[in-house]
Image (cartoon, grey):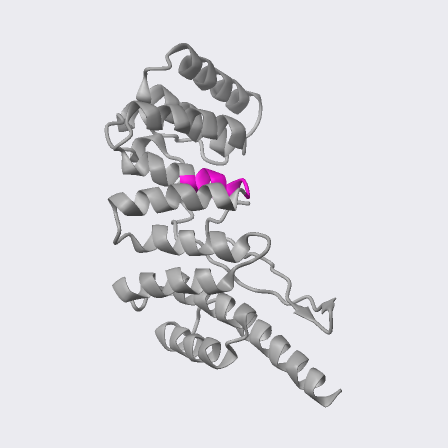
Amino acid sequence: MNKENTLFALVGLGFGLFLGFAFVVWANQQAATPRVDAAAVEGTDGADGESSITGAEGPQFDSQIEAAVKAAREQPDDFNAQMQAASLSYEASRYDDVLEFLLRANELQPDNVETVVALGNANYDAGRYEAAEKWYTAALTKRPNDVNVRTDLGLTFLLRAPSDPARAIAEFRRSLERDPNHVPTLQNLVVALTRKGDKAEARATLSKLEKLNPENPALPQLRAGLDAEASADTTKSGS
C-alpha cells in the first residue's frame, strides 16, 4: 500500500455492521519523490544513483531492474549499488527485493538515517506496519524532530489490525507540537479521533484544517466520515 499522497479507505463499524465509512489518510512525502530514492541518500552519487524512470513500464524497465539487482548482488559491499537496486525494485513494487537491498545498505552504513527511514517506508508500503514501526522508531532516535517520520509512525498504529487510534493520536500530537499547522498530521488526527470516538475534537481539528486551506480536497471525505459516525450514534440512541 503506497502512502504517497494516497487516500486510504478505512471502514468504520456501526450496528455491528460495516457502514462504508470513508476515512482520508494523507501521506507526508511529496508525491513526485520516489519513496526509496538512491540519490536522496547521503553518500550516493546523484548522477549515477538517481532513479529517473519513475512510473516506467515495459521490457526496458524490467531489464534495468534486473541489471541493477544483479549488480547489487554481485557487489554486496557497494552501498550505491544496493540503493539503486532498492530504488528500481520499489518502482516495480518488488518489496521483498527492496527490503533485501535496503537491509544490506543499512549494514554498510548503519548511521545513515535516510536508509533507516527508507526501511520504514518500504515496510509501510508493503503493509508490514509493525516492522515499519520498528524502523521509524529507530529513525526518530537519530532525528527526533522529524515531523513527517513521526506522523508516519502514528499511521502504523492507525492502519494495523487491530487498529490502535489512541497510540496514533499520541504520535500525531507529538508531531503537532513541532509543527501545529502540519496539514497531513492534522488530517490523520481527524481520522484517528473519529475512529476513537472523540468527535468533538475531531470536528475542532477539521475546523482548523478548513481555516488553513478551505480548498483542501480531503475536507469533503473527512466531513462525510464524521457525519456518518454522528448519524450512526443518533440511530443507536434512538433504537
| Viewer-proximal residue among 6 and 175 | 175
Residue 161 position in % (x across, y down): 59, 53
The residue sitting at 28% across, 52% down in the picture is 146
The residue sitting at 47% across, 79% down in the picture is 203
Residue 58 position in % (x across, y down): 57, 26
Residue 186 position in % (x across, y down): 40, 67
Q: How many marks?
A: 0
The residue sitting at 31% across, 68% down in the picture is 181
Q: Is residue 122 on the magenta stretch?
A: yes
The residue sitting at 39% across, 56% down in the picture is 151
Q: Is residue 88 left or right of residue 147?
A: right
| Viewer-proximal residue among 160 and 102 | 160
| Viewer-proximal residue among 172 and 35 | 172
| Viewer-proximal residue among 31 and 176 | 176
* Res 159 → quadrant: bottom right
The C terminus lies in which quarter of the figure? bottom right
Q: Can the viewer see residue 15 in this picture? A: yes
Q: Is residue 33 on the magenta stretch?
A: no
Main secondary structure type of the part rendered in magenta:
helix
The N terminus lies in which quarter of the figure? top right
Q: Residue furthest top?
A: 74
Q: Can the viewer see residue 188 in this picture? A: no
Residue 171 position in % (x across, y down): 38, 60
Q: Is residue 105 left or right of residue 219?
A: left
* Res 19 → quadrant: bottom right
Check the image and report above or below for 29 versus 135: below
Q: Which contiguous range is marked in magenta?
A: 120-127
